[in-house]
Amino acid sequence: MKLLLDTCVLYPTVMREMLLGAARLGHFTPLWSERILGEWARAAVKLGSDGQAQAQAEIALLRAAWPMSEVPAKPGIAARLWLPDKNDIHVLAAAITGHADAIVTMNIKDFPRHLLAEEGLERHSPDELLHGIWLKDRAGLEEVAGHVLAEANRLSGKTWEMRALLKKARLPRIAKALGS
């Protein structure tokens, strides 16, 4: 299964690492476009002067780890598409170009299911997707979450609880499943 990851699920570190951990387990092949990665880098400026540089380094690592996941832009496809937010058409175009099965996004209202269905695509929230994966592979996703928690503790200098970390990352359903 191929899943196009929208910027809003790549930029938050915990969410991205949970999703990519599930991909590393073989549950799906992640896809993105150069523009999606560029949006991530620009959004990281909010973190301060080092934010964009850190994002660029993380993007370079992402590209190295997943060299076949970047979908090339095909402007002709975008020209025929419509979404409620025209700034998201490039995401749909990348999903179509990459032959994705679904788009993983937090922006539910910007990707109406009926419009995606016309293109043979589904839409998943990251929490819904991860919970579904957990139902199939509890041990694998628990291991991924353990690594994400350890890294969050190391980087923040805090001691996070699993449930609190995942809830803060806007993953409440998987937080409940893994934090119990």
Image (cartoon, grey):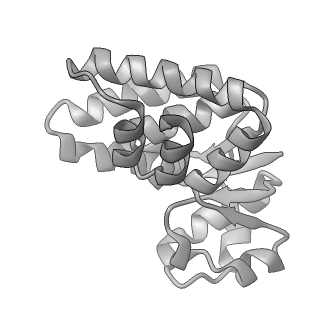
Tell me where residue 4 appears, x and y as whole percent. Answer: 67, 51
> For the N terminus, which image quadrant?
top right
Instruction: Indicate left or right for 163 with 121 as reference.
Output: left
Q: Residue at x 75, y 66 (%)?
A: 122
Residue sitting nearer the eye, 172 or 156 = 172
**Quadrant assignment, res 18:** top right
Residue sitting nearer the eye, 55 or 29 = 29
Instruction: Indicate left or right for 84 with 132 as reference.
Output: left
Tell me where residue 119 appears, x and y as whole percent. Answer: 81, 73
Q: Residue at x 85, y 70 (%)?
A: 120
Picture layout, residue 36 above or below residue 163: below
Q: Residue at x 46, y 24 (%)?
A: 148
Residue 67 at least partly seen: no
Picture layout, residue 64 above or below residue 50: above
Q: How many numbered tags mark residues here?
A: 0
**Quadrant assignment, res 6:** bottom right
Picture layout, residue 156 above or below residue 96: above
- Most extreme residue toward the front is 180
Residue sitting nearer the eye, 46 or 149 = 149
Q: Residue at x 41, y 32 (%)?
A: 162
Residue 95 at least partly seen: yes
Picture layout, residue 23 above or below residue 116: above
Tell me where residue 33 appears, x and y as whole percent. Answer: 60, 48
Tell me where residue 137 appears, x and y as whole percent. Answer: 76, 32
